[in-house]
Image: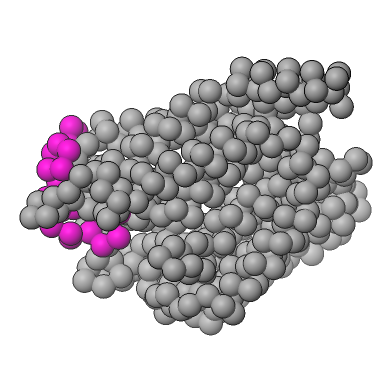
Amino acid sequence: MELQQQNNNEGGSLLKSVDWVTVILYLILIVAGAVSIYAATYNFDKSSSMFDFSGFSGKQFLWAGLSFFIGLSLLLIDRRLYEAYAYPVYVLMILLLIATIFIAPDIKGSRSWLVFGPVSLQPAEFAKCATALALAKLFGTYGFALNNWKSYAIAIGIIVLPILCIIMEKETGSALVYTSLIFVLYREGMSGFVLFAALCAVTYFVLVLKFATVMIMGIPLGMFLVFIIIMVLLVGMLAFYCRSFILTRNVLLGYLAAGAVAGALAYFGIVINGYAFFFTVIGVSILYLLYGMFHDDMRKVLLTIAFAVASIAFMFLVNIAFNSVLQPHQKTRILVTLGIEDDPRGVGYNVNQSKIAIGSGGVWGKGFLNGTQTKLKYVPEQHTDFIFCTIGEEEGFVGSSLVLIVFLALILRIITIAERQHTTFARVYAYCVASYLIFHLSINIGMVLGLCPVIGIPLPFFSYGGSSLWGFTLLLFILLRIDADRKSYGSW
């Protein structure tokens, strides 16, 4: 009787405990998404109802209704089950991803969709939820902390395994989404140095490719700039990370002296080879640091040296990886995004038309169903990956900003939910959800505006498709169910 009374009390208080602000933001986004799909696919010659199930918007409303029903069902499941079955669900999803590689049909060069009659589902979208649960379960294990290489290896293994499976499905865009979980590791104790190194790697990659044809001192300008950055960072790390005044002063004076000598030689018409100059200067500084580390914090100095060496190695690997690893269409997309190549009728066509559509919307937009670029189908995939261009053209800067504000409100709300949790499992899972959303939003908008290569990342709740909508619904409502019990965690 007492157990039954407890269950009744829990059921009665569930509705009061659910974060309805998040639910309302979710409903606003899925309704706005379905309406945007209707606008993107509207045909003046064959106009139909927004709720016509034969059209994309009608199907999306159906997906949305089913998603909300799934969400409500998830709220009825005991939150402890999500933690208890996190690993089994993860293993099942990995097996499904592996099976998808072999049984999925080839659709536009990708084997990532399972077809069930008229319905197609993408397991990679659901694997995001399973990965988030598994990672949260790992961090919630008693005594687990990111304080040794074994802990890092297990955490990274959970993240990398679905990435490898999805890459084998030739769905690189979906695989990249999982890299956003690095922010979760950072929140849970990973050194900020890793994020700093990742930022440097992206900078090196862009510079080496962007300025590969301009030569200075006999080397590409991109490599010249990267060498300079490495030298500046080396001095900066000695000053602010190692906090060694003597090492910082001596290395900096050495760089200034070398620069003065190179400038003097150039003044007299003697130009030295860039590779020889930088390898000599940086090499001498590293040899000096190897000597000086015995008088300072050895671990920090060694890490500084390792960073400089790894940076140089990465710089030379950029061209090898770009030419040998990436597919031709991937390389072209990157080159077009960086402005190195111009392909307005090929790879760059989508982005150019998208920017034209958004720019033509102006401040207030052309009005609902009045977009010319979208109605005349100039923008391919405008109801899926490029749905934001419809919003920009018809609703203008104001409407686009409102959409982004709602997304921002949802993300901030999820972070707020994360920080009020009483268990590591709940907090880590919430940050996984926030990381996925931030990555999807940033990359999709970046694609549409030409700031990122086109890699097929849908806009959450807006892009047409049931898999993406269901995937984010699973992520969000499992979080809401876990959060609803936050006040009673200590009673079990």
User: How far from the left and from the top, in percent, is residue 203?
Assistant: 52, 57
- Magenta span main SS: loop
How many marks on residues? 0
User: How far from the left and from the top, in percent, is residue 241?
Assistant: 74, 42
Would residue 243 be found to the left or right of residue 103 on screen?
right
Q: Looking at this view, is 335 or 36 the one in front?
A: 36
Quadrant position of residue 340: bottom left
106 to 444, vertically: above or below? below
User: How far from the left and from the top, in percent, is residue 233?
Assistant: 63, 51
| Residue at 67% from the left image edge and 61% from the top image edge | 93
Q: Residue lying farthest bottom?
A: 324
| Residue at 8% from the left image edge and 55% from the top image edge | 45
Instruction: Please indicate, yes or no, whether residue 216 appears anywhere in the rendered image.
Output: no
User: How far from the left and from the top, in percent, is residue 99?
Assistant: 63, 73
Task: Locate the N terminus and report the quarter of the image it occupies.
Answer: top right
Boundaries of the magenta span: 354-383
Residue 264 on the magenta segment: no
Q: Looking at this view, is 398 or 33 the one in front?
A: 33
- The way the protein has been coloured in the rendering is one colour
| Residue at 58% from the left image edge and 72% from the top image edge | 100
Would residue 203 be found to the left or right of residue 42 on screen?
right
Quadrant position of residue 165: bottom right
Q: Looking at this view, is 221 or 65 the one in front?
A: 65
Q: Residue lying farthest front?
A: 1
| Residue at 79% from the left image edge and 64% from the top image edge | 287
Task: Locate the C terminus and report the quarter of the image it occupies.
Answer: top right
Q: Residue lying farthest left?
A: 45
Would residue 369 be found to the left or right of residue 212 on screen?
left
Residue 364 on the magenta segment: yes
Instruction: Please indicate, yes or no, whether residue 123 appears anywhere in the rendered image.
Output: yes
